[in-house]
Image (spheres, rainbow, N blue to C red):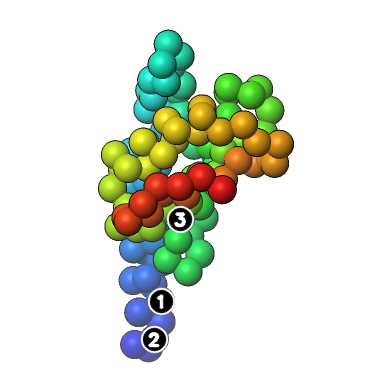
């Protein structure tokens, strides 16, 4: 029974983490130069302590952006990484942006 309780607690923590990131990013306005991007979170997956956040990419009118963060990544750092996406021109879809607690980099 103790194992089931630990699993339920872990799931609740995951749900809380997903909820926190969704509330922090969805419908957030990000200014990129003269443009404004209204972030629309379309999905969040937790895998091995990493959150993969799928975001609609209105700038390219197709595809999406996937933001990779750790549970400890500050939201401001993740937003900064999203802002920098405008500087990268990629032919791969989706664009994967990685923001960790130690650095923000694009793949």
Query: Mark 1–mark 2 contact, CB under 8 Å?
Result: yes
Note whether residue 72 is visible. yes
Mark 2 crowd level (few <14, some 14–19, many ≥20, 10 Å Cα): few
**Which residue is under mark 2?**
3
Task: Give the label, 2 or 3, closer to the camera.
Answer: 3
**Which residue is under mark 1?**
7
**Which residue is located at x 35 percent, y 79 percent?**
6
Q: Is residue 65 depicted above or below 16 in this figure?
A: above
Instruction: Provide residue 94's location: percent of width, then percent of height.
Output: 64, 41
Residue farthest to the right, as pictured: 91
Q: Is residue 5 left or right of residue 90?
A: left
SS under mark 1: helix
Residue farthest to the top, as pictured: 34
Q: CA distance from mark 1 to mark 3?
A: 18 Å
**Which residue is located at x 40 percent, y 76 percent?**
7
Q: Is residue 27 depicted above or below 76 in this figure?
A: above
SS under mark 3: strand
Note whether residue 18 is visible. no
Mark 3 crowd level (few <14, some 14–19, many ≥20, 10 Å Cα): many
Instruction: Provide residue 71's location: percent of width, then percent of height.
Output: 34, 58
Q: Which mark is residue 31?
A: none
SS under mark 2: helix
Q: Which mark is residue 51?
A: 3
Query: Could you say which quadrant of the image residue 95 lies in?
Result: top right
Instruction: Provide residue 42's location: percent of width, then percent of height.
Output: 54, 38
Query: Mark 2–mark 3 contact, CB under 8 Å?
Result: no
Which numbered disc flags the more N-terminal residue, 1 or 3? 1
**Which residue is located at x 36 percent, y 63 percent?**
12
Query: Mark 1–mark 3 contact, CB under 8 Å?
Result: no
Please tell me which residue lies in front, 106 or 37: 106
């Amino acid at each position: 029974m103790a194992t089931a309780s630990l699993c339920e607690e872990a799931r609740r923590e995951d749900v809380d983490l997903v909820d926190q990131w969704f509330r922090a990013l969805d419908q957030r306005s990000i200014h990129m130069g003269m443009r404004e991007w209204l972030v629309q979170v379309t999905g969040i997956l937790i895998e091995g302590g990493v959150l993969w956040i799928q975001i609609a990419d209105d700038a390219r009118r197709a595809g999406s952006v996937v933001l990779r963060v750790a549970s400890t990544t500050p939201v401001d750092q993740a937003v900064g990484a999203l802002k920098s996406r405008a500087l990268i021109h990629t032919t791969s879809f989706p664009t994967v942006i990685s923001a960790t607690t130690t650095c923000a980099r694009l793949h």
